[in-house]
Amino acid sequence: MLGAWQSSLVAAAALWMVFGEVGDAAPPLSRKAALGKRLFNELKLSEPDGQSCASCHSPSFGFTDPDQNLPVSEGAISGRFGSRSAPSAAYASFSPPLFYNPDEATYVGGQFWDGRADDLVLQAQRPFLNPLEMHNANKSQVILGVLLSGNGLEFARVYGLRMFLPRNTDAAFVSIADAIAAFEQSAEVNQFTSKLDFHLKGQAQLTAEEALGKDLFNNKAGCANCHTDFVVSDEPGPLFTDFTYHNLGIPKNFNNPFLSLPAELNPDGVDFIDVGLAKTVAAFDPPGAAAERGKFKTPTLRNVAVSAPYGHNGFFATLKDIVHFYNTRDVPSAGWGAPEVPENVNQADLGDLGLTEAEEDALVAFLLTLTDGYQP
């Protein structure tokens, strides 16, 4: 689904011109990004202490939640859970601000599953104050955490001592998010070092099964319609997403612990329905929100092998599961439940792909080549 959205990626891709060839060692972090890395991993920025950004976006798991036995992430308060699986922080910097592409009749870009933040700086601020995530009471509590963690001096060096004046609380809070965003934009987070990257440079050979999976991905299975392998000029490699929104018809996940939270945290209880993009659109275009019910942003497939579970609600435990769902969602004998949101289900790109089990396995084999850190 290629269109006007491509030009929005050029500015982000241009940042990579200084990073050298794919597979080179990542350049040293800038001072701001190095501070951001420390804050990204800091456990004193939650209330109570103990949860960092990395707690739900671990580098070892493709910058997603390391607890792969849960469909969604647990917050700083034990027993509190968000309603969605943690999306990857890697490669998120390439997503443009949310906009509507009339050529494709779809929204594109933004951060989070529902695009409610336009950029990483806005995104990084949200978890700090979310009662289901890092649970800070206010911005001042986050700033105090920076001081108590021993990062205050470096923060002052990067952003100035004035940031610790009470009148600058808002600016200091944004600066904390700005530093984290600088780290998330770095080559340490966005590595482009998968087997496929080396293959595209002629430095690695795909197995026969991986090559079959690549062909299926781009042709029979049609995965590349949304998980595009198109490369913007000067971008180090394909992002495997066009950042568009779709309702895939994923069933409600009744194993989601969010459904069991008390009424003050989840007023709808087990009847909660996640309408996705519609809630974001309702804030600026209420009449247009109905057409976006159940739609979620197409995630990057980079590092997908290490980022289970899958789907916005963590419904699928393995890659094989979600590939089988894409292949057989509309096959009655497959036994999938009804979509959580029955409106707007994407009928064009998935549902009955006609793949054999061997072809499903080949697709999975290809997806395994998208994990960063490959050594040719």
Image (tube, rainbow, N blue to C red):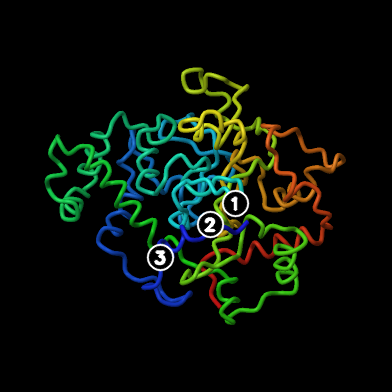
Q: What mark, if any, has residue 348 been given in the picture?
A: none
Sequence-first disc among 3 and 2: 2
The quadrant in which residue 147 appears is top left
Between 230 and 53, the one nearer to me in the picture? 230
Quadrant placement of the C terminus: bottom right
Asked if the residue at tag 2 contacts the one at tag 3, i.e. Cβ–Cβ closer than 8 Å, the answer is no
Position of residue 112 relative to residue 223, above or below, is: above
Sequence-first disc among 1 and 2: 2
Sort mark 2 into few (<14), some (14-19) or many (20+) by Cα contacts within 10 Å: some
Kind of residue indicated by mark 1: Asp
Kind of residue indicated by mark 2: Ala
Residue at left offset 49%, top offset 35%: 280
Report x, y in % for residue 74: 48, 36
Helix, strand or loop at mark 3: loop
Disc 3 target residue: 187
Kind of residue indicated by mark 3: Ala
Residue at left offset 60%, top offset 71%: 196
Sort mark 1 into few (<14), some (14-19) or many (20+) by Cα contacts within 10 Å: few
In the picture, measured across the screen, residue 46 lies left or right of residue 299, that is: left
- Mark 3 vs mark 2, CA separation in Å: 26 Å
Badge nearest the viewer, 3 or 1: 1
Badge nearest the viewer, 3 or 2: 2
Q: What mark, if any, has residue 103 been given in the picture?
A: 1
Disc 2 target residue: 4
Between 183 and 258, the one nearer to me in the picture? 183
Report x, y in % for residue 177: 31, 46
